[in-house]
Image (cartoon, rainbow, N blue to C red):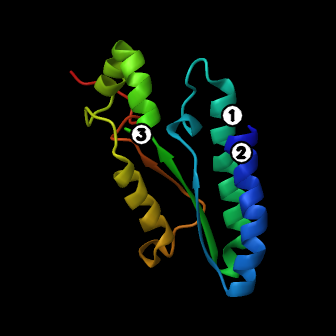
Amino acid sequence: MRINLRSVFLCMKHEVPLMKRSGGGAICNTASVAALTGPGGMCAYAASKHGIHGLTRVAAMENAAHGIRVNALAPGWTETPMVITASAQNPSFAAQTTNAIPAKRGGQPSEIAQAALWLCSSASSYVFGQMLVVDGGMTIGGFEF
């Protein structure tokens, strides 16, 4: 909670006044698909990511009139060094997770970064308080016949 949620709150606490003085800007918080789902055994993590979603929406509402856009990303399984190491330690879990993703692969960090760049660019100038899910379809639900 301290790292995942409080840090986001504290960053915005200091960013927003500076952005107000400089005429606005964009903030892109990092949540997770855990903000949409309830991954078993990860209650504190899921709660922190749900908190980021709520914090993002309230901050967007409160600061839109000041030209500040606040949005969040919700990445799914991403091939970061931490995930690669964890996958090597538990290959059956990694295979099961990858198989559950319609794209049949984890995301690349560059794909998540491109989504963040879009959220912070003028191309998304009318996007406020949204959480962009970047997960290869992981949270679509359903099943394939």
Q: Determine the residue located farthest toward the left in the rendered image.
A: 145
Position above or below: 137 against 57 = above
Residue corresponding to mark 2? 5
Disc 2 to disc 1, C-alpha distance: 9 Å
Identity of the residue drawn at 46% across and 60% down: 116
Callout 2 crowding tier (Cα within 10 Å): few <14, some 14–19, many ≥20: many
**Relative side of 138 to 42, left or right:** left
Residue 80 is marked as: 3
Identity of the residue drawn at 70% across and 78% down: 19
Give the mark nearest the N terminus, 2 or 1. Answer: 2
- Residue 122 image offset from top left, x and y in percent: 46, 78
Identity of the residue drawn at 71% across and 45% down: 5
**Relative side of 141 to 67, left or right:** left
User: Are the residues flagged by discs 2 and 1 in contact, CB closer than 8 Å?
Assistant: yes
Residue corresponding to mark 1? 47
For the residue pair 126 and 85, the one nearer the viewer reads as 85
Callout 3 crowding tier (Cα within 10 Å): few <14, some 14–19, many ≥20: few
Position above or below: 64 against 117 = below
**Relative side of 17 to 19, left or right:** right
Callout 1 crowding tier (Cα within 10 Å): few <14, some 14–19, many ≥20: some
- Residue type highlighted by circle 3: Thr
